[in-house]
Image (cartoon, rainbow, N blue to C red):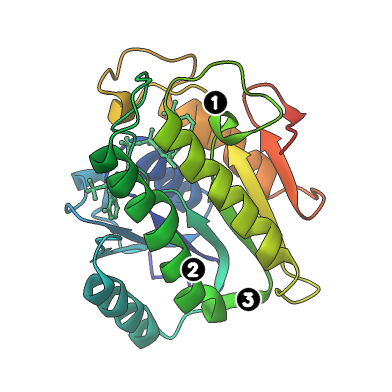
Amino acid sequence: MDFNMNKTVLITGVSRGIGKSLAEKFISHGYSVVGGSRSTTAISFSEQNFKHFQLDLTDDQSIQTFVEAIDKQNLQFDFIINNAAIGPDLGQTELKREWLESTLQVNLIGTILLTEKILGYLKKDGTLVNITSKLGSINALASSRSPAYRISKTGLNMYAKVLSDRISQKQKIVSIHPGWVKTSIDGDSTSGNLSTEESARRIYEYITSDFPNGIFWDVEGYSELGW
Ligand SMILES: NC(=O)c1ccc[n+]([C@@H]2O[C@H](COP(=O)([O-])OP(=O)(O)OC[C@H]3O[C@@H](n4cnc5c(N)ncnc54)[C@H](OP(=O)(O)O)[C@@H]3O)[C@@H](O)[C@H]2O)c1
């Protein structure tokens, strides 16, 4: 299979978890996927319609090199999916500088700086997807745990709102809560309600549907979330 220049997706955090399953889901639907993460990717991506470039969202030079690699591909993306994130304080109540800084560096600052550089590679009718979290919803706040992680996701939701003013009229933006998914982001890959494949399937179904621009959508509850 040749790299399909017509249906393309960019996914950050593609080396494992939801990002990896999203890449596999899009590839199975005939898309070509460009993925970024610090570690190299799993063997299931050794297909021709997958390209991996190294990306460390905490490092400006790495972001720049990643964007230059994309530029050389001469691609315009149907979807850009900001999926990469960390959660060192998930389940914790303490606010530590180390956790705040590392979480904001990846989930918010690095993600925003990358987005600013790659938005020009989104098709005129393309969709920018931010994988945020219900934990970032101020309306839905039900516990004081995971403050750094929550703050990073609330910030990314705000960035989506800010951006929605700037993107072209036919482009769309969506914040997605992927559900409580069995991944190692919380250090326990056995806890969760959804498999990564099921979450990716629901995200794919939603973002390829005719959804309203600027929505915050929960794929586990099949419902809109309050900001
Ligand atoms: N799992 C859940 O229940 C859940 C719930 C709500 C929201 N989410 C969100 O869903 C998304 C995916 O999470 P996940 O659960 O699949 O997590 P995961 O399995 O831990 O995967 C995280 C991905 O982010 C990448 N990443 C981490 N630090 C990075 C950095 N500095 N630069 C570039 N990439 C980096 C990792 O790759 P490398 O380590 O190779 O760089 C990895 O591919 C995240 O936005 C998360 O907040 C997850």
Rounded to the nearest angstrom, the CA distance separating label 3 from label 1 is 28 Å
**Does the Cβ of the disc 1 residue fall within 8 Å of ligand 1?**
yes
Dot label at residue 179: 1
Dot label at residue 115: 2
Marks 1, 2: nearer the viewer: 2
Please state the horizontal and vertical placement of residue 224, each as a whole percent of the image.
76, 33
Question: Which residue is found at the position 75% from the left and 53% from the top?
Answer: 214
Position of 13 compared to 134: left or right? left
The front one of 145 and 207 is 145
Please state the horizontal and vertical placement of residue 199, each as a whole percent of the image.
52, 30
Crowding around mark 1 (Cα neighbors within 10 Å: few <14, some 14 to 19, many 20+) is many
Question: Which residue is found at the position 69% from the left and 37% from the top?
Answer: 217
> Mark 2 or mark 1, which is nearer the start of the sequence?
2
Marks 3, 1: nearer the viewer: 1
> Mark 3 or mark 2, which is nearer the start of the sequence?
2
Q: Amino acid at mark 1?
A: Gly
Task: Classify mark 3: helix, strand or loop.
Answer: strand
**Does the Cβ of the disc 3 residue fall within 8 Å of ligand 1?**
no
Image quadrant occupied by the N terminus: bottom left
**Vertical position of residue 158 compared to residue 98: above or below:** below
Task: Classify mark 2: helix, strand or loop.
Answer: helix
Please state the horizontal and vertical placement of residue 187, each as a whole percent of the image.
25, 22
Q: Pointer 3: what residue?
A: 123
Crowding around mark 3 (Cα neighbors within 10 Å: few <14, some 14 to 19, many 20+) is some
The front one of 169 and 144 is 144
**Vertical position of residue 71 compared to residue 96: above or below:** below
